[in-house]
Amino acid sequence: MAFEEALAGVAAQVEQYRAELKTEEATKTAVVMPFISRVLGYDVFNPSEVIPEYIADVGMKKGEKVDFAIMRDGEIQILIEAKAIGAPLTLENANQLVRYFHVSSARVAVLTNGQHWHFFTDLDKPNRMDDKPFLRLDLMDIDPYTLPELKKLTKVAFDLDSVLLAAEELKYVSSLKRALREQFESPSDDFVRLLTSRVYGGPFTAKVRDLFSRLTATALQQFVNDQVNGRLKSALRGSAPIVPAAPEVAQANTAEELDDVATSDSDIETTLDELEGFHIIRAIVASEVPYDRVVSRDTKSYFGVLIDDNNRKPVCRLHFNRKQKYVGLFDEEKVERREAIERVEDLYHHAEALRATVGRYL
């Protein structure tokens, strides 16, 4: 059975039987042993390969056991401690695994509850198990990037040296991915402040924070969608995705531009509605032109949106400094036509016209 097929099969067992797996023993029998056997390829009934209930007395601690020890060439290489499905995978719940790792020849320790598998080594201090795993596997949400390294721990492709060489990078990359996922789901104030500082030069007030918290979440979601759509389009064309370099004319100076504009004339005030409108327009035309080529220029009478900061390439004008809001759209002769809008979000109703305008400059 292929490695990927075996992994999918064990994952299916977790989903099928998880309601009945209420104890550690049930989890070991239904999930952990099949994982060791089918996925890693070791014979769980051969004590020269897999030792169940492995005992290695440590100091005053006598008779404690680690659930499984995997042997290769007469030496213990991997220790596995199993918990019941749903149990938290904390080192406080696996003290014997930490102690046995210190005194055995194992270089890899595994803590699992059947669904989640955490793989540890000794990157921080030799012969002392790290506090954080270098590889995490969730059978209900398998990360394909982890599979090549996991495969190196199988019986047929065992390559411990390669695993250990890659462990540090795996450890930090996986941690960074989790941190990014958290930011995508709920951007923190620090993250919002960092991104806001790149596009807005005014004070970071509570109102600005609330606005940019929403805009940041929207921008992150649209960025991911754009990347996915780009890859799908490339796949449909039968070509590999190409990531173009940002054009030199598209320096990300929005915050500095807004700051210069706001301070160059005391009569000019860039409002939050204008900023929100600017980012909506950027998002709309991102399908036609790289995001950073769309810039803003505030004036006394209107808030302008331009391509490449070029007055000859106007995208639209926002007339928001009055009770009735208008968006100024441009025809093929660059003649402005004002359309009334009630809310800033109504800019989305003019998406086709905005994209058409940008398309003419390209």
Image: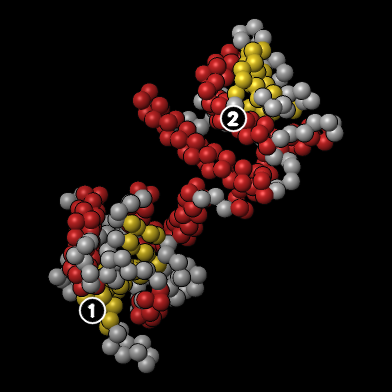
**Circle count:** 2
Of 142 and 279, which appears nearest the observer? Answer: 279
Q: In this view, does 190 lie above or below 68?
A: above
Residue that carries the numbered disc 2 in the rendered image: 343
State the residue in front, 85 or 277.
277
Residue extending farthest front: 323
Q: Is mark 1 on a helix, strand or loop?
A: strand
Rendered location of residue 12, percent (x, y): 21, 53
Nearest to viewer (mark 1 / mark 2): 2
Q: What residue is at 44 percent from the left and 30 percent from the top?
A: 230
Q: Residue furthest top?
A: 333
Badge 2, how many Cα within 10 Å: few under 14, some, many 20+? few
For badge 1, the amino acid type reads Glu
Residue sitting farthest toward the bottom:
60
Q: Depth check: 155 or 298 in front?
A: 298
From the top left corner, tell me how far across and down residue 78 is, in percent.
31, 69
Q: Which residue is drawn at 26% across and 75% down?
A: 67
Q: In which quarter of the image is residue 29?
A: bottom left
Q: Which of marks 1 and 2 is nearer the N terminus?
A: 1
> Relative to residue 354, is residue 38 depicted above or below?
below
Which residue is located at x 36 percent, y 50 percent?
Answer: 143
Helix, strand or loop at label 2? It is loop
The kind of residue tagged 2 is: Arg
Label 1: how many residues lie within 10 Å, few (<14), some (14-19) or many (20+)?
some
Quadrant in which residue 36 is drawn: bottom left
- Decide if residue 135 is on the left or right side of residue 306: left
Pointer 1 residue: 53
- Residue 48 percent coordinates (x, y): 19, 73
